[in-house]
Amino acid sequence: MSVHTQNSRMTTARLRQMKQQGEKITMLTSYDFTLASLVDEAGIDMLLVGDSASNVVCGNQYTLPITVDEMIFLTKGVVRAAKHALVVADMPFGSYQISEEDAVRNAVKMMKESGCDAVKIEGGEEVLPAIRHMIQVGIPVCGHLGLTPQSVNQFGGYGLRAKEEAEAQKLLNDAQLLDEAGCFAIVLEKIPAALAARVTEGVSCPVIGIGAGNKTDGQVLVLHDMLGLNTGFKPKFLRHFAHLADEVKGAVGEYISSVKDSSFPSTDESY
Ligand code: KIV
């Protein structure tokens, strides 16, 4: 049975209220109708169609190659699945950095064609004009600070961010700017827990952490990682809440041997 109550569509206003009331916010990525339906029925607050789809769905090493049209294709399935959760779609690399106009055009396209409720973009002060413009025209924007995977080539890897004072100060300032600009939430990725706690206390919008300790207003993980589907990836911040890689391989192995020994399909499974 669904944990949702009637008329329980998540809104950005409700998320803000949850922060004020100290109620933790949950978010997971989703990239397709079937899994998004299960995650939504389980009661998640937000579904993120992350550009991590570039890695998880497409097998790319980085998030950079995925396009606006590919994100729209994936987001459509997730939107059809979401009965309760707020659906946030990542704006891919190159879709909001060129100019404010281009950012708004791409965000409008993503919202119109996919039906998502909001978009997420990476970066602080440098993308502030684009964020302001999007919010002015009525697009809910989620910020993303700390480890921003679209900048992997600049960072030189996926290490912990903002350990040094200068970067921590910039991150605190960026979070203030995003909050003042009207972002409905900010994702903080892979930064020290104490810094994430300071950001969370210092801004009015909900802060959602991944690898940022437990003092943020909520948590987000990549669904395939937390389900244990991707055994090659196990950073310290990731908890496997299931071990589905073993389940999938076990089931497929059983299917193969059942076909090979002709025990599948049985007479009961035949017409
Ligand atoms: O793309 C993604 O999955 C994300 C999360 C890691 C927050 O941005």
Image: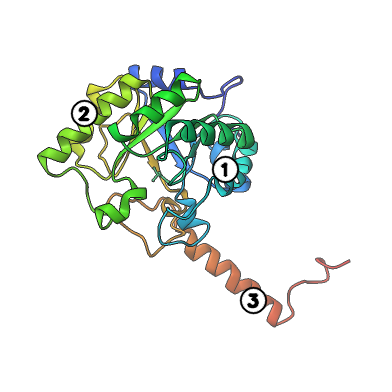
- Residue to which mark 2 is pinned: 173
**Label 1 within 8 A of ligand 1 by Cβ:** no
Name which residue lies at 52% across and 63% down.
Answer: 247
Please state which of residues 259 and 136 is positioned toward the viewer in this rendering.
136
Mark closest to the chain's N terminus, 1 or 3? 1
**Label 2 within 8 A of ligand 1 by Cβ:** no
x%, y% of residue 124?
Answer: 30, 34
Residue 256 shows which numbered tag? 3
How many other residues sit within 10 Å of disc 3, few (<14), some (14-19) or many (≥20)? few
Please state which of residues 240 and 209 is positioned toward the viewer in this rendering.
209
Could you tell me the amino acid type at mark 3? Ile
Tell me the quarter of the picture where residue 4 sits: top right
Could you tell me the amino acid type at mark 2? Asn
SS at badge 3: helix
Name which residue lies at 45% across and 17% down.
Answer: 13
> From where the camera sits, is residue 45 visible?
no
Q: Nearer the viewer, mark 1 or mark 2?
A: 2
C-alpha span from label 1 to label 3: 28 Å
CB-based contact (under 8 Å), mark 3 and mark 2: no
Could you tell me the amino acid type at mark 1? Ala
Residue 64 shows which numbered tag? none
Quarter placement of the N terminus? top right
- Residue to which mark 1 is pinned: 36
- Against 81, residue 224 (above or below) is below
C-alpha span from label 3 to label 2: 56 Å
CB-based contact (under 8 Å), mark 1 and mark 2: no
SS at badge 2: helix
**Ligand 1 shown in quarter:** top left
SS at badge 1: helix
How many other residues sit within 10 Å of disc 2, few (<14), some (14-19) or many (≥20)? some
